Amino acid sequence: MQDNGAYRPDEATVVTVLPVCARLGEVSVGKWLHSYAQSSGLFRDFITVGNSVVNFYCKCGDLETAQRVFGEMPRKKAISWNTLLSGLAFNGKGEIGVEFFNEMISQGVKPNDSTFVGVLTCCSQKGRDLFMLMTDKHKILPKLEHYRCMVDLLGRCGCVNEAYELIKNMLVRPNAALLGSLLSASRTFADVKLAEYAAKELINLEP
């Protein structure tokens, strides 16, 4: 496409190629696309382009640039905030992620279910409060991803019985990933009874 010269990259090109650059480690190509998006006006005109650039730098571990690019975006939607929030969680910056979530709320941006997947991945002790905030205040019904985040963080805190009670009272049927998180936590904290429960349920799901 570049060698031909007859076609100029557009919004779809940038949004499609940037994730591939991140996955293959082609940082130089991704940075070129970022520069092109700014000089061509795509970054200014399309929120999706800004989101893709932020996601690219997050996947590359360059959170400083990701945050700077996010700040430069002329317009943002909830998905823009979710992109950076998930990137912070992905890179183990949980405390910064929770602060970023609080900033999002303070600016009047309405969170959605993807927002809470990101922030629940970020935090540990604050997870209970955020889970209640999601269901009680924002009226978002938990999905399997939210339950898995909660079981994982409760397991890491050693609250395996609380994780088990959460699974028992779920509004949806648990999947293998969720039960696997409970099994792993039960093994870590030597809770044989819960480990047996998780193992049996896993076998029933995936014989």
Image (cartoon, rainbow, N blue to C red):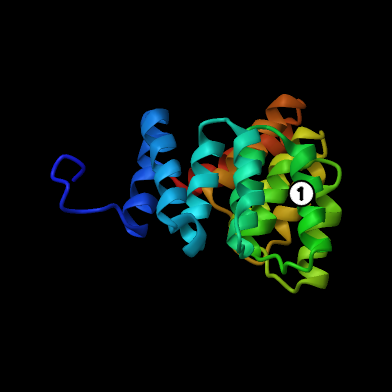
At horizontal 72% and vertical 42% (from top left) the residue drawn is: 122
Q: Is residue 79 left or right of residue 130?
A: left
Q: Is residue 157 left or right of residue 197?
A: right
Give percent across and percent down for residue 14. Answer: 37, 50
> Residue 182 or 56: which is nearer the viewer?
56
Whether residue 196 appears in this view of the structure is: no
Q: Is residue 117 above or below residue 93?
A: below
Mark 1 burial class by Cα count in 10 Å: few <14, some 14-19, many 20+: some
Give the position of the C terminus as an image quadrant.
Answer: top left
Give percent across and percent down for residue 124. Answer: 80, 40
Q: Is residue 98 above or below residue 63?
A: below
At horizontal 71% and vertical 57% (from top left) the residue drawn is: 168
Q: Is residue 96 above or below residue 79?
A: above
Q: Residue 169 sits in which quadrant?
A: bottom right
Extreme residue toward the bottom, this view: 139
> Residue 9 or 206: which is nearer the viewer?
9
Say which amino acid is labelled 1. Phe
Give the structural element (helix, strand or loop) at label 1.
helix
Count the labels in the image. 1
Give percent across and percent down for residue 150. Answer: 72, 48
Give percent across and percent down for residue 101. Answer: 76, 53
Whether residue 31 appears in this view of the structure is: yes
At horizontal 31% and vertical 53% (from top left) the residue drawn is: 13
| Residue identifier under label 1 | 100
Extreme residue toward the front, this view: 39
At horizontal 39% and vertical 37% (from top left) the residue drawn is: 32
Q: Residue 65 sits in which quadrant?
A: top right
> Residue 159 or 111: which is nearer the viewer?
111
